[in-house]
Amino acid sequence: MPNKNNTAKSVKKDATVKIMALGGLDEDGKNMLVVEAGEDIYIIEAGLKFPDASQSLGIEYIIQDFSWFQDKKDRVKAIFITHGHDDVMGALPHLLRQVRADIYTAPLAAREISRMLKKEKISGVKIHKINRHDSKRISGRKISFFPVTQSYPGAYGLAISTSQGYVVYSGEFVENFDDLDDHFRGNITICSKLGQEGVLVLMQESKGAERSGNTSPRHRILPILEDPFTQYPDRHIFISVYTQSVYQIQEVMAACREANRPLVLYDKELRRLVDGLEEIGIDIPRHLIIPVDRTRDHDNTVILISGQGTPLFKQLSNIANNEVDDVQFSQDDVIVIASPVVPGVETVYKSMENDIYKRGGILKVIDHKKVLSMHASKEDLKMMIFMCRPKYYLPVKGEYRMLCANAMIAEEMGIDPDHIRILDNGQMAVFEDGELVSCKMEAELHDTMIDGKENWDMAGVVLKDREILSTDGVMVLAIGLDAKTKKIVNGPDIQTRGFIYLRDSEYITAECTKIMEDIIRENVEQKKYENLETRSQIRDKVSKYLFKTTGKRPMVLPVILEIGQRQ
């Protein structure tokens, strides 16, 4: 627990400390943690996640349900964005439309967030750049930041001081003692000092918890790039990376520097990112970078192609098929896939493979069972636990099996099993006087689907409609009534899409026509006709008939046009 003198001088008295996740638990992405110390609320990350390709149904991405903040907006003191990946900052514009607070983030991420907010026309938000070993007072409370090694430069973890002890979030990190670049070098010795003062809760990511050992040095691709660079000294080499894997982008540039090979930064987004790296002080080998139209001026050019998921592999297919105007692909060229095949892109990846082999190109795929993503493995997590010596431990960020593996690591490190909690999104851990007193469900959360620029369908109604349309189709029943007498003057006319072939199912359409006419006549005769209610009755009765007859549940859309009605 915290040193009493330190507590009395610098820490607010907090009757309760509460911790809850609005996303990121038992899922990949959509990360958001909320720490409530007394009356102060701090948000850690605001990420999105992408839908499974087989279940997207037009969804671009998924974000959190922000309704919990509805009556608490004024209590939010800060939003911490630990690095610049979509799964921790992609939902930020949507959050800021609901909650306004200052943002604290790394210098490169600050640049990206400024650009994002300008694009979304969000103004009046102050962005603070966090540098190494920063410590700030926010709403009178000390917040300590510590640098970590991650695939994004300037990434950090943080500690929020409370009168019950520090609440520490590790961030995403690896223990890498060989990297001397100041933008990537971590320093978790700060956590040892936090441990001495007293850590109430440590929250650590779980995405690498199932892996033994340390992640480093297995996260590096630079040694692996030496092989194709040496084996094919006079051939063009195309290399794919994910845009947000900044560490790997720098490794490709380092490999080009060592081999003195020209480098093409193929896409605009990649060139913009490299400009940002140079802006924050990272050394870029400008003397080697050439424009794409000079690719064939050299026999040994390296073409670096970046992107996200499916679009990246589609771009590689287009290049292999020579369906782009600015670069030509030949059978002597080499393609190195440094971007792992993540769930949802397998089909596009296989298609890309076929295209490359048809062209006679040479394909080299980096084995991502050997090259690990830059997330903490078992020994990395143990080191952080050893440094912080937390009283309570909360695994965060990852699918449920990963959270369980992380919890077992904490138990191996001697933390009391009763002090380890695996929470669900919306479940709040409440601490009083340094003790966990409850873990109740605080909020019933729904995923918020984003289709285009606006959020929609938090309850899944529209998504369910799209699913019905994609499986059982639609039936439209249209009829015209005299606006005054309500007598049928036109139709009914029935059209279907994706349901049945009408010419072979005339008995079905005849019965649906009869149902529609009977309901309208009956309602008119009983003087209870009302357009909306009548359509609802037709929809229900026709749907039941169709399911009984065909075993399908198409979307039924009755249209009653009252002709001659004055507007």
Image (tube, rainbow, N blue to C red):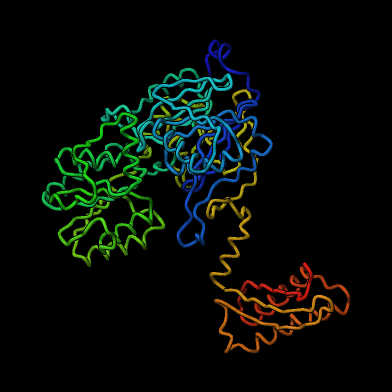
Residue 259, quarter of the rendered image = top left
Residue 181 rendering spot, x and y as whole percentages: 28, 29
Residue 379 visible in image? no
- Residue drawn at x 42%, y 43% is 207
Q: Is residue 544 above or below residue 435?
A: below
Q: Is residue 344 left or right of residue 527?
A: left
Tell me if residue 1 comes above or below residue 513 in the rendering: above
In terms of depth relative to the viewer, which is nearer, 244 or 221?
244
Q: Residue sitting at 40 percent across and 21 percent down?
A: 133
Q: Position of residue 357 (x, y in %)?
A: 22, 64
Considering depth in this image, is 11 or 527 the residue closer to the camera?
A: 527
Residue at 58% across, 68% down: 468
* Up-down relation of residue 481 to residue 303 (above or below): below
Q: Nearer the viewer, residue 263 or 57?
A: 263
Front one among 290 and 193:
290
Point 50% across, 39% down: residue? 117
**Residue 274 placement, left or right of 435:** left
**Count of marks placed on residues:** 0
